[in-house]
Amino acid sequence: MTESSDLPQVLLFTDGACLGNPGPGGWAYILRCVTTKSESEDAGGEDDTTNNRMELTAAIEGLRALAKRSRVKLCSDSEYVIKGLSEWLPGWKKRGWRTSAKKPVLNKDLWQPLDELAQQHELTFEWVRGHTGHAENERCDELATTQATLIKEGKA
């Protein structure tokens, strides 16, 4: 396996948005490779979804866009995504995808692929407060909200 110091360093900024919850939603990410000084972004959405599903999808799509194993700092305003990946996943898996209250994990269909993708990289996390002027978070919010709006208006 590659030495950690040899891995590309990547910043992954993500956000999800929903017009109504549930309702039309959008997701977006910005990938910034510190090593190569390159950047890309992408966004998409769904017709009938929730904010948490869009937050998860943004992280999934961002990690999916990486061509090779990387050291990734995931920056998100979603405590659901950050705590899920950094704290809750091991317990859910140990309990057969059940919460500590023995209820099925919500959005398991997204958590499982996110878990698989996360294991392919060295992940660290940074929670950022939403709507406070954080440039990348604001950009992701704009992209995600635009996608949700286009879907709501029947233009996507």
Image (cartoon, helix red, strand yellow):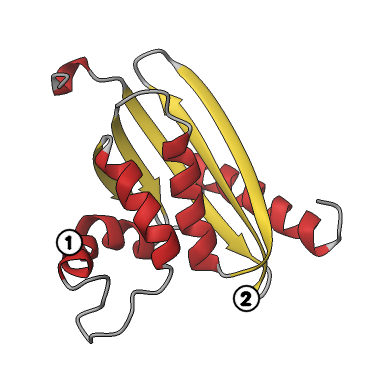
User: Does residue 89 sit above or below 11 in this rendering?
Assistant: below
- Residue bearing mark 1: 90
Q: Quadrant of residue 10?
A: top left
Residue 74, position in %: x, y?
35, 43
Residue at the (34%, 15%) spot, across then down: 35
Tag count = 2
Q: Quadrant of residue 139?
A: top right
User: Badge 1, how many Cα within 10 Å: few under 14, some, many 20+?
Assistant: few
User: Badge 2, how many Cα within 10 Å: few under 14, some, many 20+?
Assistant: some
Residue 127, position in %: x, y?
33, 53
- Compared across the picture, whether 90 is left or right of 37 comes to left
**Residue at far front of view:** 96
What's the amino acid at mark 2?
Pro
Q: Is residue 25 visible?
A: yes
Residue 75, position in %: x, y?
37, 45
Which mark is nearer the camera, 1 or 2?
A: 1
Q: Quadrant of residue 18?
A: bottom right
